[in-house]
Image (cartoon, rainbow, N blue to C red):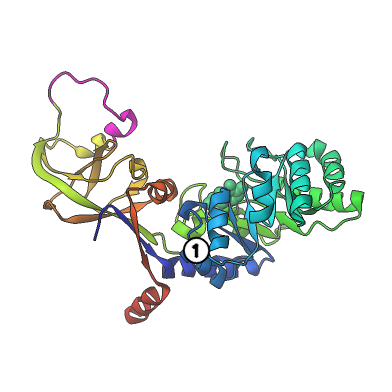
Amino acid sequence: MTAPRLEIDLGKIQHNATTLVQRLDARGISVTGVTKAVLGAPEVANVLLQAGVSGLGDSRLENLKAMRAAGILAPLTLLRSPMLSQVSRVVTNADVSFNTEIDVIRALASAARTAQVTHGVVLMIELGDLREGVMPNELNSFVRETLACSNIELTGIGTNLACRSGVSPDDRNMAELSALATSIEEAFGIPIEIVSGGNSANLNWVFAGDDAGRINNLRLGEAILVGREPLHRCPIDGLYTDAFSLVAEVIESKSKPTQPWGTVAQSAFVDTAQLHVSDRGVKEHCIQAILAVGHQDTDPGGLRLEPGVTILGASSDHLVVDTGSLSRPVGSEMSLQPNYGALVRAMTSPFVTRVWKPCHETISAHQTKT
Ligand SMILES: *Cc1c(COP(=O)(O)O)cnc(C)c1O
């Protein structure tokens, strides 16, 4: 088999998705399965749909297009505000888009008229994280202008936190979103069907309380795919954190000094060059292996290695590790566990191949274990 490769366990993804769908359903919250980290892979999309997500969301139109082309009929939502230059492709490839600019909504309306379709719009509201969103005090006039657009259906409102400034979802900002839904309904006499409270960073808040107010939808990527919540990157109870492994091959394995020699200046990638130097204690030599994987394949800082192995440095094409007490011969492989950021990079790299492990293999392995 070729390396580097991502081994993707669809059964673990299905387990994670089913678990989250059920836990949230008990609180009246539907799940939009977010596919951007896997580039809209139909293999994953189908597993999410079997797990009971209400629709699929992605920030890239290309990924939504790939899912439609693969015959996926579920509702598709474009999560990133459409570019003005892509509105006609948005209305033909997405059922709904998230929006914050009236000029874009008007352009979507015009494109939807031409395509003879109705396009759904979710208005995103700024609640403090300072990424996308209409300011709450401007929402009423924004809604009025949106309702005046033909071929546009205002399907809901939403917000996105914890992505730019790390502002956490809490009782206060979530109650504000609920109150805004109700105030739009009262001011305009229309139902706000979807109140989309956020992403995987909302899970801690949802599970800590017993009343989510009007919040009836979350968009989940990271929690489903890697089983962690993004605020503290803690594993979520009962979920797999290892649905993805990045397998890389050893191309050099030697005992080497732990300290470089010569005149030392900057290296190619300053941030990871000194990754775990402090962990190395007072050893003078170590068994150093080079794996044929680097910044061009993944985010080396986002990889978790087997116990006893530490990352010493990384460049475009090399990952240098201290293999601890075991030597890893040339030609052997090592399994690395990517976090969400490292996963996105690996899925996007043309140098990383993918191996899909179908659902039934995980399930039968699970049955033998118990
Ligand atoms: C990526 C994205 C999500 C999903 O985020 P996760 O943290 O992966 O769950 C949700 N909403 C928007 C607007 C996004 O861009």
Res. 354 in view: yes
Residue denoted by label 1: 42
Can you say whether 353 is above or below 296 in the image? below
Q: Does 270 lie within the magenta span? A: yes
Q: Nearer the viewer, residue 23 or 21?
A: 21
x and y percentages locating residue 111 in the rendered image: 74, 47
Q: Residue furthest front?
A: 114
Q: Residue 271 placed where, x, y %?
A: 34, 31
Element marked by disc 1: helix
Name the image quarter holding the N terminus.
bottom left
- How many numbered discs sit on the rendered protein? 1
Relative to 234, is 48 above or below?
below
Question: Which residue does the image show at 63% across and 38% down from the upper left?
Answer: 129
Quick one: 134 or 64, which is closer to the camera? 64
Q: Nearer the viewer, residue 235 or 297?
A: 297
Q: Amino acid at mark 1?
A: Pro
**Viewer can see residue 134:** no
Q: Which residue does the image show at 39% across and 62% down from the upper left?
A: 243
Residue 153 in percent (x, y) is at: 80, 54
Q: Nearer the viewer, residue 260 or 278?
A: 260
- Give the quarter of the figure containing the C terminus: bottom left
Q: Magenta stretch? A: 261-275
